[in-house]
Image (spheres, rainbow, N blue to C red):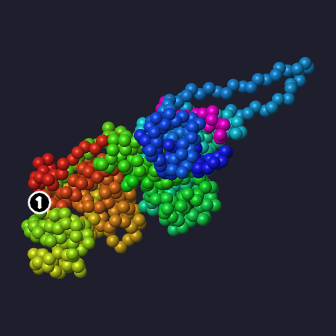
Amino acid sequence: MWCKASSRKHKRWEGDAVLVARGRTVVLKDMEGRDIGRGAGYKASELESLCEGQTLMVGGKQIEVMGVISDEDYAKGRCFQNAAVETPAETVLKAPVYRPVSKSFTKPALKGGALTDSEPEKPICKPRHDLNAPGALVMPRPTTDHQWLYNKSGSPLVDVVIDPHLTNHLRPHQKEGVVFLYECLMGMRLPGRCGAILADEMGLGKTLQCVCVLWTLLRQGPYGGRPVLKRALVVCPGSLVKNWAAEFNKWLGRERISVYTVDQDHRVEDFVSSPLCSVMVISYEMLLRSVDQLKELEFGVLICDEGHRLKNSNIKTAGALTALSCERRLILTGTPVQNDLQEFYSIIEFVNPGILGTSAAYRKIYEEPILRSRQPTCTEEERCIGEERAAELFRLTGVFTLRRTQEIINQYLSERIEWTVFCKPTELQLRLYGVLLATRPIRACLSGARTHTYTHSPHLACINALKKLCNHPGLLYNTLQEKSDEMFEDGIMELFPEGYSTGAFSTADSGKLLVLTDLLSAIQHVNRTDRYHIYNCCPTSLQTSSYLKGFHIKKLLQLLTNLINEKENVFVRVAIYTEELTTQSGKNMEQIKLNKVIYFNIFGFVKEIEEDTGRACQLGRHCDSTASFPQRVSMSELMHWRHFSGDVQSYDDIYLNHARNNITYAFQSTTSKSQTTV
């Protein structure tokens, strides 16, 4: 305990604190990890002999020792936590043997044959489905503490059994996920908290697991068999609203459940007049418009698909969702940690508010020590403390966070082949590339110069110019023609053919386009059933592929999805050329039955491309190959290896505790023997 220094006999203690002693110096930290006092010049023997009840002056504050903290508790940060979170024991999925309830004792008849007045027998509650059937998936029974909190009426316990119609479609990892979500949403893993995060990678069936849990809680319950939920709210991106409704109809059928999708034709107000609909699916955009109407409705559970959108607690979407009075919250995301640990705190705070303390305490206790331990100049003590804090953080959050990778389903997937085709540049591209490398801006970047008279930051401009040249010289021509700062010399324009001034670009001027055109032509003649997704970030670099113009993005992609899935022999060539369309189209790949992916240009949308490759190569789909087209010995190859080698530090890997292998760039040598050159 600590208080301001005073001569009063009865001190007014202001709060608890932690005193850290190193040699002859001490640091006083409050329970949020902030430094509130420092002192030096103490005798080492005096600090070592401190015990319970003794006092000490530190930086104008008087402290009284209440106990000694072990090195392990301080390293893990447990001394700053109000209550420890215990990891529950592993759940056993074996179905218990059901024993019928025995009849209550009945008094014998009295003299004369008269019977005593007895209370009517209570009806025997039985499980909705046979829990002794082969392959039955039975949920864990609530503990005594859980019954004390949630079964005030003393209703009899009833085993909750997943509908066999759904159980037959679940794989082992999905059954574990269903049990995990059931325990979290029922408050069995953390007393008084009903939030969860399902952070499985793409293709592991997060939607199916949610459908199973929702259907179970809407029809069953552990106390008297009463359903736990009456209504459920699913919030997702606009392009996935129809997909969620289709998933419910696919696994349950319209005769079992009715899903209400909110769009321009179906308003939130009409949901009240639809008593048969127990699940509402709404987009994040429509939720912001209808948040006042949603506050008037009572939902038993809130599911947020693509939940990494809530990585910032200050955005309107997060505020609107937090305003809904719903205790059970579930986030679905394939990337629980994207950029930094503060974003991870935001989604944790949404599902289980206050479990990690305030944002300032989280930053001092966990985030800063973890980041400090990953610096090259960190001390051994900082490294040890950072590792212990990271382990403790992920132990606390692991109680309600489930993360699996695609490694657990590799045995069910067809063999996936990845090809990297290094395309030979054309003569025009080689000539322009050599001239660009000799320009002043690029030479200044390569020499490490810090000041430039012509621009403040030429690095991104130089990378962008080389990137466009690798795709097609016409992209560089348009950039130089529209530039007003004259960053590059005017002599470069003289190297372009005369036809470029009219905008007539030729496929023969791009090595990557030549290879792509020949590849698509050959595939179309060999196998027209293959369906490709071509990624590109430049609108004019894929003149030979069909464009998606003139339609609203979401409606257009839904039409494209239906067209591809209805016609088996359709040959798909899709050019993605805007950030919004790239993101929306990637999410629609959950519905499109594509089996091949081509990366024409990989300079942007890193996370989306990784996720969409997983969508194309997942359970129930035949995905046998992916291909990428970097240009050999160029900026294109360097960016290719930075993207696919995993050189950039990822918090997802830290979260999964996977080690990274050191990768050597192929750009460091003039050839790549392990790759194919065309």
Front-most of 475 and 650?
650
Q: Nearer the viewer, residue 452 or 310?
A: 452
- Please indicate whether residue 612 sits to the left or right of residue 115 in the image: left
**Residue 461 at what x, y percent from top left?**
23, 69
Residue extending furthest top?
111
Q: Nearer the viewer, residue 34 or 10?
A: 10
Q: Is residue 147 magenta?
A: yes
- Give the side of residue 485 with respect to residue 393, left or right: left
Can I make out residue 358 in this image?
Answer: yes
Is residue 305 among what the camera can see?
Answer: no
Give the residue at x 48% y 33%. Answer: 90
| Residue name at image x 19 percent, y 57 percent | 638
Q: Is residue 428 magenta?
A: no
Residue 622 x, y percent position in the rendering: 30, 47
Q: Please tell me which residue is depicted at 76% across the width and 23% down the height of the picture.
A: 105
Amino acid type at circle 1 is Lys
Q: Which residue is mark 1?
A: 424
* Percent coordinates x, y for residue 661 in the rendering: 25, 43
Identify the image quadrant of the C terminus. bottom left
Residue stretch in magenta: 134-150
